[in-house]
Image (spheres, rainbow, N blue to C red):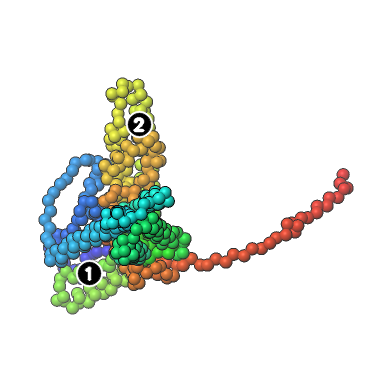
Amino acid sequence: MDTESTYSGYSHYSGRSRGSHRHGERSRDRHKSRSKDSRSEKSVTINTPPAEPLLGDSAVRGEQVQDDNWGETTTAVTGTSEHSLSQEDIVRITKDLEDSVGLDCRRYLTRTLAVILGLLVFLTPLAFLVLPHLLWPEKLQSCGTACEGLFISVAFKLLILLLAVWALFFRPARAGLPRVFVFRVLLTVLVLLFVVSYWLFYSVRILDSQDENYQGIVQYAVSLVDALLFIHYLAIVLLELRQLQPCFSVCVTRSTDGEMRHYNLGQLSIQRAALAIIEHYYCDFPIHNPALLSASKSRAAKHLAGLKVYNVDGPGNNAAAGLAHSQSRAMIAAAARRRDTSHNELYYEEAEHDRRVRKRRARLVVAVEEAFTHIKRMQEEEQKKAPGEVMDPREAAQAIFPSMARALQKYLRTTKQQHCHSMESIQQHLAFCITNNMTPKAFLESYLSAGPTLQYSRDHWLARQWTLISEASVTSGLKDGSIFLLKCVDFSLVVTSKKIPYIQMSEEYIDPKSHKFVLRLQSETSV
């Protein structure tokens, strides 16, 4: 029984009226499609700058942007489109621009303040040593051998401190966090107060009194450098070593398809734990494929769709209306029975899909093996040619790609991966495999199974911004039962944390003599 059928309660229903009714239905469908297209034209997607596309944005539009027939033709089809911007779109664009400008200003301001503080820290010991020679040189006592040895100590300690600060603090920023890093701010305030305290003591006890003991001044500068080295050691403990010991087990679940991973984290704040989870996500989670989700949704909508009832002659006749009502009730009952058996349809549909995937995969494997066999023959022939006539890997990949393009295209379409791989990326991967003398199986591994997100092009994974949603403050530490969300354009990551329990181990001593036994054998044997 079809899901959409037309039933008539009248015996004198003519073919002309049926044709006019069908024509009216087609016109209404065309009107609905035109209205839907007009509504879709009013909604516009704002593209981010080329260096920072939205995560999943190209994946959603991949089937529209990329030519799916690259296995059959390489003709480029271009066109123009007209879009309209609403007031909400303009407000959203303005907000995104303000957020990006604010993030850039905050990043450059933080870096500028760090450079200024670093210069103040490194120039302060040098100023302690130079100012007495500039202000009261005639009153200073001569610097002996011990004092000159302290100069070497100060020089090497400042060099070590410079390298240590550069290695710890002046690294490329991995991300922009919503809040400040508490420990980093604490260390900055501590260093600032420390340097100011030394300057106050120096101005009151040395500058005002014009101290003549230059060796004591040098020892005072050496003590400042030693204290700065100890503060740097404290920074290493708080920023790097404290988080190494695992304390929490976090469960990360992708909201769209339920993909799940578990990680062990140390004592981190919520925002730094979120940053670590995002870094793990790009390396561990398979790429987000919205095409598979849309296929499952369309299948569910197909099974849940009801039947439409049409009264072609209008509600004028009560007998006809009663007959149509009884027919509609019968149709609703049939639809309910059909929904009860929808699991059988789903089972056979998935079985048919698996059969098609295996069939397309077998054809793809055979085509790729034949192409690589052809490459080996070409390499044997090129060894006999002159050096100027040898074909490079790029040309070899372009030469054998058409033989496998159709099988690869059909497999990618069947598995809903056509938006993840362009013709250019496949040829580059093929040239890479030829250059490194890889096998056909190594070439196919990138297409037979979904890999981590970072293995694909930047257009499929590079996100401009992640949104952290948490009831607790993002600067507070992880706790047992903490829950927060990392929201992106197409999906969100739901994170739950559990504290690793305290493990109590006991020792049980086993006496080595308890394992000894005596084996007694009978001297008599059976004949």
- The front one of 233 and 251 is 233
Label 1 close to label 2 by CB (< 8 Å): no
Residue at image position (35%, 35%) is: 435
Amino acid at the residue labelled 1? Val
Residue 178, quarter of picture? bottom left
Residue at image position (16%, 63%) is: 94
Tag 1 residue: 309
- Give percent across and percent down for residue 361: 37, 45
- Residue 488's tag is none
Mark 1 and mark 2: Cα distance apart in space: 62 Å
Residue at image position (26%, 72%) is: 327
Residue 420's place in the image compared with 202, above or below, is above
- The front one of 93 and 9 is 93
Name the image quarter holding the N terminus. bottom left
Of circles 1 and 2, the one toward us is 2
Residue at image position (76%, 55%) is: 516
Query: Residue furthest toward the front?
Result: 138
- Give percent across and percent down for residue 224: 37, 59
Q: Residues within 10 Å of mark 2 (few under 14, many from 20)?
A: some
- Give percent across and percent down for residue 497: 42, 67
- Give percent across and percent down for residue 487: 30, 63
Q: Is residue 112 visible?
A: yes
Tag 2 residue: 375
Local secondary structure at mark 2: helix
